[in-house]
Image (spheres, rainbow, N blue to C red):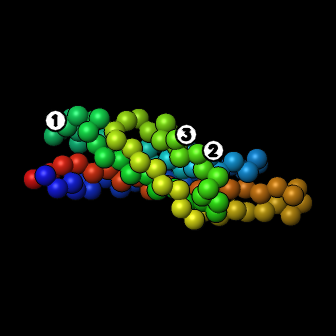
Amino acid sequence: MPQKRVILEMGTGNDLHGGDYTKAAIRAVNDALHHSSLGITRALGIEFSSLQVEVTVGVQEPNKVDNEAVKAALPGGQVTVNAVKGGIDVPDPDGGDFAIIANAAIQVRIDLP
């Protein structure tokens, strides 16, 4: 059966001090997760573990995101995580620090006839 996207959720997260891209990415994923409820699995009798979950996280330095840690933030399904160039780094001119803003998109696909 062909897979069809049935859910697309977006979220934003940040790390205000510390420069932790993974922390900002996980917060963006959690923000997206808290915008939805996957009642579709119960309604269609689909096993939650069979969901194909694709997470895309945008940050300024994607190579600094621990994709496995982001994956662990998801409640289940067959998860893939891809960190890409995006988001915003906001410098603090007085503190020599910067805030990281990450964006996340979570797509869920299921087999449908």
From the top left corner, tell me how far across and down residue 44 is, in percent: 15, 40
CA separation in Å, label 1 and label 2: 34 Å
First in sequence: mark 1 or mark 2?
Answer: 2
When asked about the image quadrant of residue 63, the answer is bottom right
Quick one: SS at disc 2? Answer: helix
The alpha-carbon separation of the residues under discs 1 and 3 comes to 29 Å
Foreground mark, 1 or 3, reads 3
Residue, disc 2: 23
> Where does residue 111 sit, x and y in percent of width and height?
18, 49
> Residue at (48%, 41%) from the top-left corner?
71
Marks 1 and 3 in Cβ contact (< 8 Å):
no
Badge 2 amino acid: Lys
Q: Which mark is residue 69?
A: 3
Q: Could you tell whether 4 is left or right of 67 in the image?
A: left
In terms of sequence position, does the residue under pointer 2 or pointer 3 come before the other? 2
Check disc 1 and report the residue beneath it: 45
Structural crowding at the residue carrying mark 1, measured as other residues with C-alpha within 10 Å and reported as few (<14), some (14–19) or many (≥20)? few
Q: From the viewer's perspective, is 51 left or right of 90?
A: left
Q: Residues within 10 Å of mark 3 (few under 14, many from 20)?
A: some
Query: In the rendering, which numbered label is found on residue 74?
Result: none
Q: Is residue 65 left or right of residue 56?
A: right
Residue at figure coordinates x 41%, y 48% from the top left: 80
Secondary element under disc 3, as helix, strand or loop, is helix
Tag 1 near tag 2, CB within 8 Å: no
Q: Which type of secondary structure does the marked residue at label 1 adopt?
A: loop
Q: How many marks?
A: 3
